Image (spheres, helix red, strand yellow):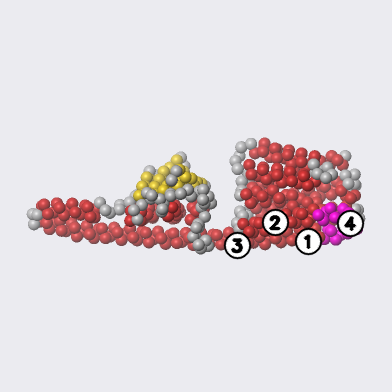
Amino acid sequence: MNNIFENIASLTECFIVVRFCNRFLGFKNAKLNWLKSILIFGLLAADNILFSQLSGFENISIMLLLIFIFLYSLLFLNGKIYEKMLVTIVPTITALPINLIVIQTFSALSHCSVLELTNQNGDLRIMVLFFSKFVFFFVCEILIKMRKRGGYSLSKVQRGIQLSCFLLSFLISNSLWSISRVYTENQPKFLLVYIMIVALNVLLYILLNKMQHDNILKEKYILANASLKSQEQLVIEARERYAEIRTLRHDMRLCLTTVAELIADKKINEAKKYIESILDEKINTASFGVDTGSVIIDAVINNKIAFCTKNKIAMKCMIDTRLGELNDVDISILLSNMLDNAIIGCNGSNSPSVELIIGSRKSYTGIIVKNSIAVSVLSENPELKTNKKDKTIHGFGINSIRKIAKKYDGNVEFSENGNIFIAEVWLKNIK
């Protein structure tokens, strides 16, 4: 009878682990999620029942458990690699200390030895199993709720410290468990050590969570500062365009006055030649730019066109949709970052060129920027990190683009086609 309860406890633990993984990270898509859950549950159950209960196979069982969970999260669940590594080891390093503390607590209260409580025929074994699984489920629920408060924003060093401390705690707990089964007379001391290990891990988690919160605030501050600078640049660009228009209007008034005087003096040929010179010098060389339906967005694009013309960078624009449904400031910041990256990226290529395409597809607006490149960018810098020295104030252009895309339930893709780098952003239109 007790063997049946052992198997039920093992299945319950597998169910809690699968539920924790699914809710902690979430599925990549909504197709056959129940089948994926049943598959990993079956693998964990087979490992737990067949290997973990066999003497000498405990370590093999733990290794298989970690491998199964990691592959499951890698194939079917969301999240970064670090998050998937975390969700792989957290159930294991959480379940073991909980089981040890529960066993040691029952041993201290009932005056029974650990061997008696771990024996399948022990009278208190069923109660120990029930209570340990209940505590394990409760702890997993707390971790899931903490996860929903926000994503991870730890540095690589901080992540490494967190994972290393968790793994060391697990190894220490496992070693103490082996020792406690031999030196049964020191059970209260072992219980105190287990509690201190858990407390240490809780304090570490709280500390790193605080660091994560500070990192998120720092990143938001830098992005807000970058956004403010972008808006200041927009104002400068709009002023430059306005100044150009005022200059052109002033010049045209003088030119038209001169033409009128020539015609009044019946100098028709001179007036004709003068008009032709005006067309060549003023009208044909003037940059009239694009019209997207937004003065702010027009100022950004037209300023980049003027910059490319001045620096002998071929720039083409193809806009077949209006951007009135999207926030002007967001789109202007997005375009400014994308076009700035493209202008910088085409430096060094034989024929520097930039192409802007804005179109619509169903309920989405697509902004595609292409630029020529001398060498492959993604092969040398797949994460598109900045190569500027001060990384505390640079390198947030790509991050800003991703933030705006996320705000509009869109996506960002970077690709290459030969010697052309392509940045593609799709934004969901606001109705």
Which callout, 3 or 4, points to the residue nearer the camera?
A: 4
Quick check: 89 left or right of 184? Answer: left
Disc 4 on helix, strand or loop? Answer: loop
**Residue shown at 46% from the left, 49% from the top:** 375
**How far apart in space, not on screen, are marks 1 and 2 (Cα)?**
17 Å
Any mark on residue 196, and which? 1
Is residue 416 something that shows in the picture?
yes
Q: Which residue is mark 2?
A: 164
Q: Amino acid at mark 3?
A: Asp
Disc 3 on helix, strand or loop? Answer: helix
Residues at marks 2 and 4 touching, judged by CB atoms closer than 8 Å: no
Q: Earlier in the sequence, mark 3 or mark 2?
A: 2
Residues at marks 1 and 2 touching, judged by CB atoms closer than 8 Å: no
Q: How would you rate the neighbour count of disc 3 (Cα within 10 Å): few for under 14, some for 14-19, many for 20 or more?
A: some
Disc 1 on helix, strand or loop? Answer: helix
Q: Earlier in the sequence, mark 1 or mark 2?
A: 2
Which span is picked out in magenta? Answer: 175-192
Q: Which residue is mark 3?
A: 214
**How far apart in space, not on screen, are marks 3 and 4 (Cα)?**
45 Å
Any mark on residue 232, and which? none
Q: Which residue is mark 4?
A: 183
Residues at marks 3 and 2 touching, judged by CB atoms closer than 8 Å: no
Number of numbered discs visible in the structure rendering: 4
Image quarter of residue 201: bottom right
Q: Is residue 374 or residue 49 the one in the foreground?
A: 374
Q: Residue furthest left?
A: 266
Q: Is residue 320 magenta?
A: no
